[in-house]
Amino acid sequence: MLKHPELTLARVERFIRNELQPRIWASQVPMQAGVYRPSGNISPSDAPRQVYTPVQPATRGDRYGAMRGFGLPRWFPQNGAVTPYAP
């Protein structure tokens, strides 16, 4: 049991706000995403030549199909630029 839980919580929140979040979400860049829902299995070499439907960023509860092993596959290309992290 913590002797001063409010003080400890305040320190953890301050660390997350001042140290951790700026390093994780230093900047945001626009990205484009799409989905292709084939009627059967296709090879990875065929996937880039397919027609993809644009999709918005996922929110909780979105359904794109089974992660793996069940149902039909889904292909999700992602396009964007990522800048290197510099401390």
Image (spheres, helix red, strand yellow):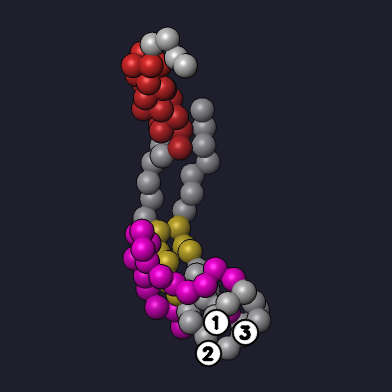
Residue that badge 3 annotates: 42
Tag 2: Cα neighbours inside 10 Å, few (<14), some, or many (≥20)? few
Q: Residue at x 52, y 85 (%)?
A: 38
Q: Amino acid at mark 2?
A: Ser
Residue that badge 1 annotates: 72
Q: Residue 5 location, x and y as percent?
A: 38, 16
Residues drawn in magenta? 47-68
Label 1 sits on a secondary structure element that is loop
Q: Is residue 3 left or right of residue 40?
A: left
Q: Nearer the viewer, mark 1 or mark 2?
A: 1
Q: Nearer the viewer, mark 1 or mark 3?
A: 1
Q: How much space separates mark 3 and mark 2, taking CA atoms?
A: 9 Å
Q: How much space separates mark 1 and mark 3, taking CA atoms?
A: 10 Å
Q: Nearer the viewer, mark 3 or mark 2?
A: 2
Q: Which mark is residue 39?
A: 2
Q: How much space separates mark 1 and mark 2, taking CA atoms?
A: 7 Å
Q: Is residue 57 visible?
A: no
Query: What secondary structure prevails in the magenta region?
Result: loop
Residue 11 or residue 8, whichever sits in front: 8
Q: Is residue 23 visible?
A: yes
